[in-house]
Amino acid sequence: MMFAGTIAFPSVFSLQHDPKENLVRDLFIHDGYNITVEIDDYFYYPGSAVTFHGRLTNNGTGFSGRIDFDLIDPHGNLCWGGMTHTDSNGNYSKTYTIAPTPVFGRYDFTVYYEEIPSVRASVSFEVIPSIKINTITGGIGKVHATIENTRAESLHNVSWTIIVSGVGGFFTFMDLQTNGTIDELKANETTSLKSRSFMLGLGGLEIWVIASINSEEYTVYTQGRIILCFILCDPPSLLS
């Protein structure tokens, strides 16, 4: 599947007279200037490469020209930008490598024709984590979580941690941590995790679930309550 964007520039004509030079200069912006941009997918992962390619044309004919481009991250910050030249047929291609620990969310890429900045095209894509923690739930004496492989290939040696900390009350344990490793998490597969120690207490809880693969780390946080051995958890919030 290919994702594309394009915006055409409308016809503009102007005639300007310079009395000092006693000559007429014809300034034309020809109808039909156009630029396109395409990418090969909509979802990308940390460390992967996104190639933007397209064509600069005038009335359907490609030509060599300078184009400028920028990439805006999900926080609205410029994370990449620059310029390049199209070849004699108007074609261009630029590749951006996503950081190993990126900002997750939607990125917006825009390319401009340098001589007429209104001639531009944009395309968007999402950077998503390779692994996701979908749920954190309680139960009798333990905290449970589910972790998902979002990729279309198996992941190996996925590390995970569940941290549970008491935040007040009576007989409430403090700072219990469970660590583990998933040898293989198959493509699009979800598996369950749980804390090892049986918990007893009465009061509030803070809970972190962390999963990591290579340099990519995903952390989810929630609060909960323990009543003797019964644990209740609020909906989790993504931290990274």
Image: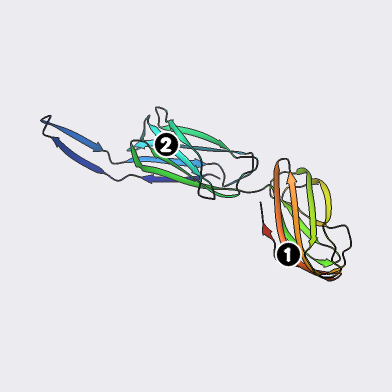
Residue sitting at x 72%, y 62%? 222
Q: Which residue is mark 1?
A: 223
Dot 1 falls on a residue whose secondary structure is: strand
Percent across and percent down for residue 94 are 50, 34
Which label lies toward us, 2 or 1?
1
For this orientation, the residue located farthest to the bottom is: 227
Q: Which residue is mark 2?
A: 68
Percent across and percent down for residue 213 are 74, 43
Mark 2 or mark 1, which has the lower sequence index?
Answer: 2
Q: Is residue 99 visible?
A: yes
Q: Nearer the viewer, residue 164 or 59?
A: 164
Dot 2 falls on a residue whose secondary structure is: strand
Q: Residue 147's quadrant in the figure?
A: bottom right
Location of the N terminus by quadrant is: top right
Image vertical order of residue 87 relative to residue 190, above or below: above
Percent across and percent down for residue 25 are 17, 33
Q: Residue 100's quadrant in the figure?
A: top right
Image vertical order of residue 152 relative to residue 19, above or below: below
Q: Is residue 202 left or right of residue 189?
A: right
Q: What residue type is disc 2 on?
A: Asp
For this orientation, the residue located farthest to the right is: 198
Q: Is residue 197 left or right of residue 65?
A: right
Residue sitting at x 24%, y 37%? 28
Image vertical order of residue 232 relative to residue 91, above or below: below
Q: Is residue 213 left or right of residue 84?
A: right
Separation of disc 2 and disc 1 at Cα? 47 Å
Q: Nearer the viewer, residue 133 or 86?
A: 133
